Image: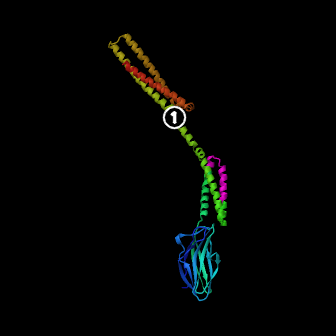
Amino acid sequence: EEGVTYSYNIMCASGEANSTQEIIFSTETLEGFSYAGPTSVTPNNESVSQKGNYSARVAIYNEKSEALTVDLDVEGTCCNLSFMIGSERKRSVTIPAEGERNLDLNVYSPLHVKPGSYNGTLTLTSPNESTSRPINYQVSRHPAVENYTDLRTRAGILNSTINDYRIAGIDTSDMEKTYRNLTSHLEEANSSIQRDDLQGLKASVSEARSDAEKVRKMLDNASWKKYILLNWWKWAAGFVGLYILFFLAVMVGIPYYRIQTELTRINSQLESAVDARKKGEKQYFQRKIDKDTFNEMMTERQNEVLQLRGEKEDLKEELDRFLMSKLTLENYLKAPWKGMEEMEKWWAANRKARQNLKDEQEGE
């Protein structure tokens, strides 16, 4: 049939070695010869690897009784496309009478070609007619280029981390020197890609990977310094906060509780002393005790009341000037020692209260 156009894909095998894939063919008759082109050259979703060759087998049949010469042309939006017989590139081929010629449609992708899908055109021209067919082929990234891309991303992360360490106050001069070597090797790797130099790319990537590991080890070794430098103020703030709580407890809480406890005790003792005095007066008027005993009892109770009232006034005065006397810089700095003094006062007050209670119980 004249004017028939076939579309097909060329998905070339990954790797550096050449590869050939047998294809299922369709036939188009052109002036006594037929061309067998692939209906699909996408076995197993393969693709042309950067720095890789792929060959798709095609065949041209001559149905005439005399030899026929056919010009061959193939163009693409990237890569090197050509017809090959063995290792020889062919721009035309002569087909014997009623015979056929087998060729390889070869695709080569340099390292710098961006992975993706590309289009091309295959053209066959006989003495009296020409036909073209669109082709499609995929290019995949070479493993060495993949390693280069990963290292470039990793280098960006390392650079950011080095900056964090420097801001924290750590000496990063050795890290930066090694990092400059790393970026230099990455630049060499990029140049090798542009030159389509696979061995140079591999060597540069290997050196860059070694430098990246050195930088990572330096960062790991200095991580504890960074942790301390970034967190020391938190620890200091925590310590100050705890010290303030301790200061308020020993210089405010405990003393205030002690004074209030002492006032409660004194008020209770005053009530007891007054009640005892009233009881003595009642006993005297009822003639249960004589005058001398009464006078002795009154004097003792009066002295007790006066003493308790004096202690009460002292505690009230201490309470009035409590905050001003306790919340001072001197007490803040000497809180541990002042705290011990306050604790001793508290214990002494407790001992005294227990002793008074015991005396009252024995007196009764």
Crowd around label 1: few <14 · some 14–19 · many ≥20 (10 Å) = some
Does residue 160 lie above or below 261 as drawn? below
Which type of secondary structure does the marked residue at label 1 adopt? helix
Q: Main secondary structure of the magenta part?
A: helix
The kind of residue tagged 1 is: Phe
On the question of residue 77 being in view, the answer is no
Q: Residue at x 41, y 17 (%)?
A: 301
- Residue 200 image point, x, y percent: 66, 63
- Residue 30 image point, x, y percent: 57, 85
Magenta extent: 165-186
Which image quadrant: the C terminus?
A: top left
| Residue under numbered circle 1 | 246
- Residue 303 image point, x, y percent: 44, 17
Which residue is the extreme one toward the bottom?
65
Does residue 42 lie above or below 358 as drawn? below
Residue 264 or 119: which is nearer the viewer? 119
Residue 210 position by quadrant:
bottom right
Number of callouts? 1
> Is 34 placed left or right of 315 in the picture?
right
Q: Is residue 357 magenta?
A: no
Q: Is residue 181 magenta?
A: yes
- Residue 348 image point, x, y percent: 47, 24
> Is 76 placed left or right of 289 in the picture?
right
Does residue 337 lie above or below 95 as drawn? above
On the question of residue 144 being in view, the answer is yes
Residue 248 or 178: which is nearer the viewer? 178
In this picture the colour scheme is rainbow
Which image quadrant: the N terminus?
A: bottom right
Residue 91 position by quadrant:
bottom right
